[in-house]
Image (cartoon, grey):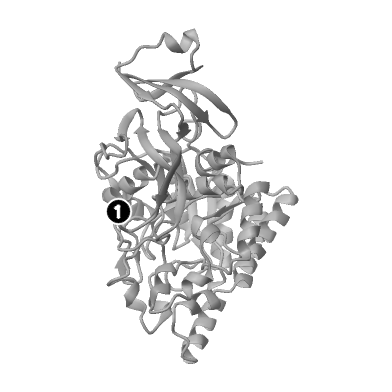
Amino acid sequence: MSRTVIRGGLVITASDEIHADVLIEDGRIAALAASGTPAAEAWTAERTIDATGKYVIPGGVDAHTHMELPFGGTFASDTFETGTRAAAWGGTTTIIDFAVQSVGHTLREGLDAWNAKADGKCAIDYGFHMIVSDVNQETLKEMDLLVEEGVTSFKQFMAYPGVFYSDDGQILRAMQRGAENGGLIMMHAENGIAIDVLVEQALARGETDPRYHGEVRKALLEAEATHRAIKLAQVAGAPLYVVHVSAQQAVAELTRARDEGLNVFGETCPQYLFLSTDNLAEPDFEGSKYVCSTPLRPKEHQAALWRGLRTNDLQVVSTDHCPFCFEGQKELGRGDFSKIPNGLPGVENRMDLLHQAVVDGHISRRRWIEIACATPARMFGLYPKKGTIAPGADADIVIYDPHVEQTMSVETHHMNVDYSAYEGKRTTGRVETVLSRGELVISEREFTGRAGHGVYTPRSTCQYLL
């Protein structure tokens, strides 16, 4: 039996803050005891980690990543190996990535393909959502089988006609199936049909720069799609999780639905909290680095997102990590913003940016852990195995120094992408040590993990329903 003791830190979970020592046995948390008490002092272990003056927090759960995603004629630049290693550096110990069903193919084929990409490559634990691109009777039957196997969430798109797009009838059928089998429908809520018209008109006017990506993907079309998704879910009697919420009007739709007592949930991402259309407008095609969908919004939307996180009208902060290099990938859209691959790198930055939000007074320490660890674990059927520090939980633990200052930069990050979306941003707080199921992955700012340590993790159904 291997034993590790973490001594002297401030243990922070979504519900508590306590100066406690943590005992780990065989990859799981065995006990907590107040630091300095006879119970804690009596513990013996092969390894002792001194966390004095540091936070001891659960490993982050990033419920929205896209490693190796094919998009726009290219692939996301992080593999499961590089992406999960970067996640570990940033204090995230579990990701849920998206397996893709291609039109004309089965869900099983998509899931098998993504299992093959990830198997033996990941530095941290992982699971899969399923992107449903082709709703038919066979697909609906497969949804039942996947839920039984632990793939309990299904993503649909109101955007990207001709690629991932589902019409209202297809969405309703999938939602009805989710209502029956317990699967959670995740929605990319943008009116893609209308957006395509605006894209065509903008390009015809010669408006080709990256900033027009944000201008055609209007906040009202995010709000309209969010409203429509909510009503379809209401008709189906199904819960709904809206991904990457960026616009204050979309937050208002979620707030209204939740005030009515509906099982409607919202996720936002660090890019919407810290970046804006000012970045999209950067000269010399630099704005292409910030092209993602939903798009970055004017800064005034940020206040509504922070308020939504404080009031729990938004429950989760994930990254939508989908990196494309500036050279050779983002550049595909020179002269035509609609050809810029959509996505930003961020899996390594999320925990630090949200700690900066604590420092800045936007959220509390416990809320930081709630939106980054506990709630994503509960939302997607991983709690209390993941997302908390409690006896029986996996020993996914981060020793976090809240005082160290750092400057985010492509020079120091570990994501496989040639720029940082937060280049030059100064933040307070930094990951020092990371354990995944009791094994050291990051040890005092050195990577000690390995590809293949991370294991596939089946999930139960949503544990966050009203």
Q: Is residue 88 left or right of residue 187?
A: left
Q: Which residue lies at the image location 30% right of the left edge and 41% below the top edge? A: 123
Which quadrant would the N terminus be assigned to in this image?
top left
The x, y position of residue 430, in whole percent, is 41, 42
Q: Amino acid at mark 1?
A: Ala
> Residue at the location (30% across, 50% down)?
80
Place of residue 378 in the rendered image (x, y in percent of width and height, measured from the top left)? 54, 38
Considering only vertical position in the picture, is 343 above or below 144? below
> Which residue is at the far bottom?
205
Q: Residue at x 58, y 69 (%)?
A: 298
Q: Which of 329 and 68 lies nearest the eye of the viewer?
A: 329
Report the quarter where the C terminus lies.
Answer: top right
* Element at label 1: helix
Whether residue 393 is visible: yes
Q: Is residue 148 left or right of residue 435?
A: right
- Residue hosting label 1: 113
Judging depth in this view, the residue of 422 and 392 nearest the camera is: 422
